[in-house]
Image (tube, rainbow, N blue to C red):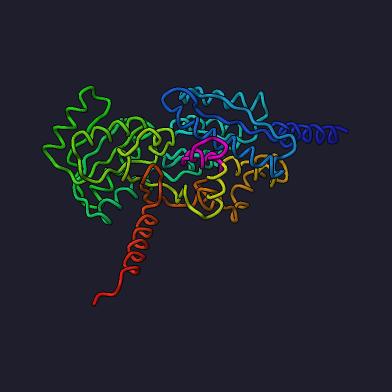
């Protein structure tokens, strides 16, 4: 009798643990992002993609039965983000967190998702070692290391740039990618950083003019929030800078590009392969329908939000239960054939997406892969020469 009671007690404990882990809970996704504060523009762009993905899935009949989405605004505060995730799991029964738009928020969420044993799927956080610090963290963005190295290699090896001036806003959002670029460009590739302009300094405009005049650098590498990057581009034009202007993926906000005008034309930066005016599917249909729905082209943040929500929905539909290990099975092994609008999506052992950024260029307000633009230029020249009469 005592042995039977002990067995029953142990089984009861296991059932309680499984219920706490969410085996029988509803398919609830918590969207944790800033819509206010200094990083709010990025969260709002991600929101558009998330909303469009839910609409898209609803029309296609791909929403799990009982699906709910609960949103919170982190107001760009990582500590608040962590507290809100804890509440979403305990109060709302959230099984997947779609969020950590910035690396700072992701850092704050790691201990919470470990304690709560809940999936965090980040569309955009790029800090180098985030995935290796939690088995529950997955992200769609390439790492800061890859982004910094891609820009450095392009400038030094493909364009032959030897001297670069750096502009940086010294924020957590951009600090790591700037450090990676600096180290790789100087230490690995033998380039020279002639000057660093800190945009938090009140007199940075004057320091910029003096540095450009004194050093005449071949390229400028601008790291910061999108609005600050645009401010630097305006400053470079004012100082008649004729060199290469390179920046980071943080610049690719459609709201900013729409106001930038010609000052942004020719600016380059690394992204996953994403050509918003491509005829290839699924990008073409996504961009066309998104434009019809919102009256603007989808930037990389909207695209990654769209893909992240679709990945979350696929994991909820594909898992045998809402028990976290079952969701992890789908994310780790069940996405091999999934083609998102930002490219093929498959996660490695660290939860990082298996893709590398390539250089993109802004032309006439649209962001295109540099290789695509080069090929289109070659094709136009070939067609032009083919239409000329034969020399006599």
Report if residue 304 lies within the magenta region. Answer: yes
Image position, residue 287 (x, y; %): 53, 45
Quarter occupied by the C terminus: bottom left
Q: Quadrant of residue 10?
A: top right
Q: Vertically, is 386 above or below 154?
A: below
- The answer to whether residue 156 is left or right of residue 258 is left
Image position, residue 28 (x, y; %): 67, 33
- The answer to whether residue 347 is left or right of residue 173 is right
Q: Nearer the viewer, residue 370 or 83?
A: 370
Quarter occupied by the N terminus: top right
Image position, residue 253 (x, y; %): 43, 36
Q: Look at the image and give the residue range highlighted in magenta.
A: 290-307
> Which residue is pictured at 17% across the width and 27% down the height?
206
Q: Residue furthest right?
A: 1
- The answer to whether residue 15 is left or right of residue 129 is right
Principal secondary structure, stretch drawn in magenta: helix
Q: Residue furthest left?
A: 214
Image position, residue 57 (x, y; %): 66, 42
Q: Quadrant of residue 246?
A: top left
Q: Nearer the viewer, residue 92 or 345?
A: 345
Count of marks placed on residues: 0
> Which residue is pictured at 33% across the width and 35% down the height?
175
- The answer to whether residue 339 is left or right of residue 275 is right
Report if residue 286 lies within the magenta region. Answer: no
């Amino acid at each position: 009798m005592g042995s039977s009671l002990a067995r029953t007690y142990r089984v009861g404990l296991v059932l309680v643990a499984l219920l706490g882990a969410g085996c029988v809970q509803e398919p609830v996704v918590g969207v944790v992002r800033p819509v206010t504060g200094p990083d709010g523009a990025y969260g709002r762009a991600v929101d558009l993609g998330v909303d469009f993905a839910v609409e898209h899935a609803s029309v296609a009949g791909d929403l799990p039965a009982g699906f709910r989405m609960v949103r919170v605004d982190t107001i760009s505060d990582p500590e608040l983000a962590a507290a809100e995730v804890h509440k979403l799991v305990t109060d709302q029964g959230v099984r997947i967190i779609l969020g950590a738009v910035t690396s700072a928020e992701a850092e704050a969420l790691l201990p919470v998702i470990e304690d709560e044993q809940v999936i965090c799927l980040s569309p955009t956080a790029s800090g180098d070692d985030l995935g290796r610090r939690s088995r529950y963290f997955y992200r769609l963005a390439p790492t800061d290391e890859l982004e910094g190295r891609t820009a450095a290699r392009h400038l030094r090896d493909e364009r032959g740039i030897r001297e670069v001036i750096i502009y940086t806003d010294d924020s957590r959002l951009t600090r790591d990618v700037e450090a990676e670029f600096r180290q790789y460009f100087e230490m690995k590739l033998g380039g020279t950083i002639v000057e660093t302009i800190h945009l938090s300094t009140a007199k940075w405009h004057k320091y910029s003019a003096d540095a450009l005049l004194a050093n005449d650098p071949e390229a400028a590498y601008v790291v910061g929030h999108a609005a600050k990057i645009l401010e630097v581009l305006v400053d470079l034009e004012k100082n008649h800078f004729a060199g290469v202007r390179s920046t980071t993926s943080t610049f690719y906000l459609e709201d900013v590009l729409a106001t930038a005008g010609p000052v942004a034309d020719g600016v380059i930066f690394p992204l996953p392969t994403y050509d918003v005016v491509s005829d290839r599917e699924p990008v073409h249909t996504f961009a066309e329908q998104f434009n019809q729905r919102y009256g603007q082209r989808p930037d990389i943040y909207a695209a990654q939000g769209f893909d992240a929500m679709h990945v979350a929905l696929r994991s909820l539909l594909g898992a045998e239960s809402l028990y976290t290990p079952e969701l992890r099975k789908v994310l780790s092994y069940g996405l091999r054939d999934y083609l998102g609008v930002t490219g093929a999506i498959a996660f490695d052992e660290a939860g990082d997406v298996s893709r590398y950024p390539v250089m993109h260029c802004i032309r006439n307000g649209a962001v295109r892969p540099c290789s695509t633009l080069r090929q289109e230029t070659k094709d136009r020249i070939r067609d032009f020469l083919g239409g000329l009469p034969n020399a006599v």
